[in-house]
Image: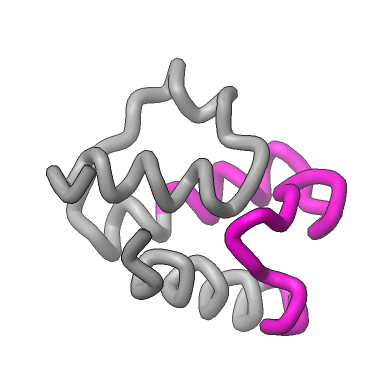
Amino acid sequence: MNTSVITTIQGFLTKTFYVKPHRVKPYTRIYEDLDLNQMEFLEMVMIVENEYQVQLADGELGKCKKINDLATMIERALGRV
């Protein structure tokens, strides 16, 4: 796993939703552990898509339960996985 994707997500969550950086780990649950709602999650996805210049499949986003799931989708879109 490329940690730069996790770091990008962590930075976004810290700046936008004031989540403490130590709370954002690969296996952190997006909704339960970070208490994000669907709209906040989609905002995070849009920012990360813009950062990496990728388009994630809307149908796949429903499978993102953990930070690692989102990072893996991004890496797959970048051709790293």
Please name whichever residue, 17 or 28, is drawn nearer the observer in this view of the structure.
28
Please name whichever residue, 28 or 60, is drawn nearer the observer in this view of the structure.
28
* Quadrant of the rendering where the N terminus is positioned: bottom left
The structure's colour scheme is: one colour
Reply above or below: 4 against 77.
below
* Quadrant of the rendering where the C terminus is positioned: top left
How many numbered badges does the structure rendering display? 0
Which residue corresponds to the image point at 74% horizontal and 49% vertical from the top-left? 29
Left or right: where does residue 74 sit relative to residue 37?
Answer: left
Left or right: where does residue 55 sit relative to residue 38?
Answer: left
Residue 43 location (% of width, % of height): 54, 51
Residue 9 location (% of width, % of height): 50, 66
Which residue corresponds to the image point at 32% horizontal and 65% vertical from the top-left? 2
Which residue corresponds to the image point at 18% horizontal and 54% vertical from the top-left? 53
Q: Quick check: is 14 in the magenta stretch?
A: no
Outermost residue, top side: 59
- Which segment did they paint magenta? 17-46
Residue 72 location (% of width, % of height): 39, 45
Which residue corresponds to the image point at 62% horizontal and 70% vertical from the top-left? 13
Reply above or below: 80 against 8.
above
Please name whichever residue, 65 or 1, is drawn nearer the observer in this view of the structure.
1
Q: Quick check: is 39 in the magenta stretch?
A: yes
Residue 3 location (% of width, % of height): 39, 71
